[in-house]
Image (spheres, rainbow, N blue to C red):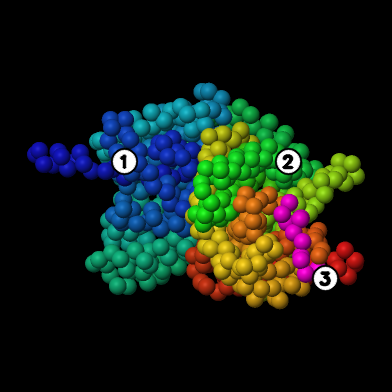
Amino acid sequence: MMNSNLQSHSKIFKIALLGNPNSGKTAIFNLLTKLRHKVSNYPGVTVEQKMGIVKLNNGRLAELLDLPGTYSLTPESLDEKIVAEEVTKWVHGIHRPDAIISVVDASNLSRNLYLTTQLTDLGIPVVMALNMMDLVKSGTVDHHQLSEKLGIHAAIPMSAKEKWGVNHLLDGLWKVLESPPPDCSFMIPLNIPAIVSTTLEPLTSIFKENFQYSPRLAVAQALRVITRNSALELYRKIIQTLPGLDDNLFEKLIDTRGEIIGQIESLNYSHRILEATLRYAMIDDMVKSIQPDNEKILKQVTRSEKADRILTHKWLGPAIFISIMYIIFHSVFTLATIPMDWIDESIHKIGDIILRTMGPGMLRDLLVDGVFGGVGAILVFLPQILILVFFLSMLEDSGYMARVAFLLDRFMTKVGLHGRSALPLISGYACAIPGIMASRTIDSWKERLITILILPLMSCSARLPVYSLLIGAFIPAKLLFGFISLQGFTLVTMYILGTVVAFILAWIFSKFIPIQGKSSFVMEMPPYRIPIMGSVFHQVFTRAKLFLKNAGQIILAISIVLWFIASFPSSPNSVNGNHVEDSYAGKIGKIIEPVIKPLGFDWKIGIGLVTSFAAREVMVSTLATLYSVDNGENSIVHLSSSLVKDINIHTGKQRYDVLFALSLMVFYVFAAQCMATFAIVKVETNSWKWPIFMICYMSMLAYGASFLVYQGGRLLGF
Ligand code: GDP
Ligand code: MG
């Protein structure tokens, strides 16, 4: 007795969180687990499985599994397949959760209830989180009636945005966990016409006899299997894993399905939409009875609609989009200068303090030149990266990105991409890796692959330090036509260059990659929402952490190694100020130099190109270390002025000029220099073929483009 009590107390409950994309699943997950992560206003941004721990109202702990957003349990896109596979396992007793939270967007009931009715079939207790109640007029959704009609255990009105209702949700959860209610999949039948259920009978009984399904689940699964072959395919695996089943069971399912499809069609139903037709009929009845005046439930739909008339207008839409992007990149350059100066000054001050307090020697040189010179040079760019990520997260969370996808769909389709490629590609401006992950929302493999292939050409934030350094040093701070900053314009040009070439390549790739299933553009337009600032800042914070971790580990390590190979062997004629040229690093650079000379690069840049294979921004810290070591005066150098003042003693001329800067920037637009990106591509495409292909085409492109810029510029007399 005592023992079993203890056991039931130590049992960790398992709860699964399911809901349509954009219903607020992630926001609720964050509230329940108090663990922050990405909240986004775009269908299907949560593509991975996430796990968290929830503290129930009586102090007990439960595991909460966050599944990808899905409209139904019928596997169509990759996300839906993940969910459908997982749910199929539950039905057969594998990882079966103790309860399901079905997250529903109350401002869009009918569509959201589709999934909820499917979840109710499973026989697992369902608690509905009736989210976004802040958007509907009070009194328009009767949650008591709703849960009664659905046959679920509770529907709990809440708002993840205004953070109310969460405690009620926890109460509701605890109630079903503590005393599991009777399985309603036995009690409330799926409400479909008798003629259809009679026709389905042969399949229904196979499910009942072999898998011991409840009557309702058997009908539901029969419907789904008739509707989609992909639903039938899920059984292939399950039949293999479950013991004691008839060897020919899967063949039997295929045959029975074929026969029933014929009969269904002769009843004048289209079998491909059978499940949707019947379920929506059921849901419409239900919604009408609890919400007779469906149109008037929303508080602010007109505002979103009005905004959309302008923001998705044929001409105004794209013009506004381009202006927004311009403003973002412009502010990245201007707004960031204040904190950048501040960081720069602090680093120099700390360096000076070390110089004054430590006795001269190798350790001091290493600290000042290697660590502070190298890592410091890169830290300066943190504000720019954070501002960029901040703006992109705001756009995403406000619902604007979905409009961008809509605006760009026609264009995207023309170049072999998909409207849904827009978000992954735009996130690529922050970092290619989340972009590649987000491409999972694209159903068709071909369009997804092309999106991945061109994604690293979207100038990511790691390139910003390189652009900024070169632009700050070599592009005059003048105004074009009196109002466009030449520096900002150059920066934007680099972004546009990468983007335009990416689209051209997409079009070329699309001619060579065979099609496997075409996808259509079905995407809801979520209403515009004021972003939840906490989650925007969380994203900014995550990016900052990542950047600092990079600076702290990779860049620090490279800076230290570099300092050694740049300082030794110490040359006797270092008085000339060019002892780095004779060091090991110099020798390595000199080996590379002939290859990159036609691009206008010398051995110093050569060293930077090698080190920045790890990550692009390492170029900046590499140059900083090289100049710090070279600078006999033992102080942290000012990198951009060092670049400008660098004189080639062999020619007596300035080593670097504007043309060089442009050539190097263009090289960075295209070069394949981020190992982490290619590792992710390997995982996502499940082969080495594509990452290797990307490294090859990007390297060739980088070399060719730089060559054109430098040699072309020289021919033109620059
Ligand atoms: P998911 O796709 O289901 O994970 O949805 P998210 O949690 O990413 O939320 C989608 C969008 O809805 C985000 O912009 C959230 O800020 C917003 N959101 C989430 N919950 C609420 C809510 O209760 N009320 C309102 N007005 N907005 C919400
Ligand atoms: Mg989410």
Helix, strand or loop at disc 2?
helix
Residue at 65 percent of width and 64 percent of height: 574
* Residue that protrudes farthest toward the left in the picture: 1
Name which quarter of the figure residue 125 lies in.
Answer: top left
**Residue visible at 52% across and 31% down in the picture:** 161
Name the one closer to the observer, 333 or 193.
Answer: 333
Q: Which amino acid lies under the numbered mark 2 shown in the image of this protein?
A: Thr
Q: CA distance from mark 1 to mark 3?
A: 65 Å
The residue pinned by badge 1 equals 62
* Tags 2 and 3 touching, CB below 8 Å: no
Residue 253, quarter of the rendered image: bottom left
Labels 1 and 3: the sequence-earlier one: 1
The residue labelled by disc 2 is 334
Q: Which residue is mark 3?
A: 711
Q: Up-down: is 390 above or below 235?
A: above
Rendering coords of residue 70 (x, y %): 49, 49
Q: Is residue 159 left or right of residue 390?
A: left
Q: Which one is in front, 655 or 430? A: 655
* Quadrant containing the N terminus in the rendered view: top left
**Residue 665 location (% of width, % of height):** 73, 60
| Distance Cα–Cα, label 2 vs label 3 | 32 Å
Residue 320 on image: x %, y % = 77, 42
Magenta highlight range: 641-651
State whether residue 713 is above or below residue 212.
below
Give the left or right position of residue 361, taking residue 406 as reference.
left
Residue that appears at 46% across and 34% down: 130
Task: Determine if the magenta segment contains residue 647.
Answer: yes
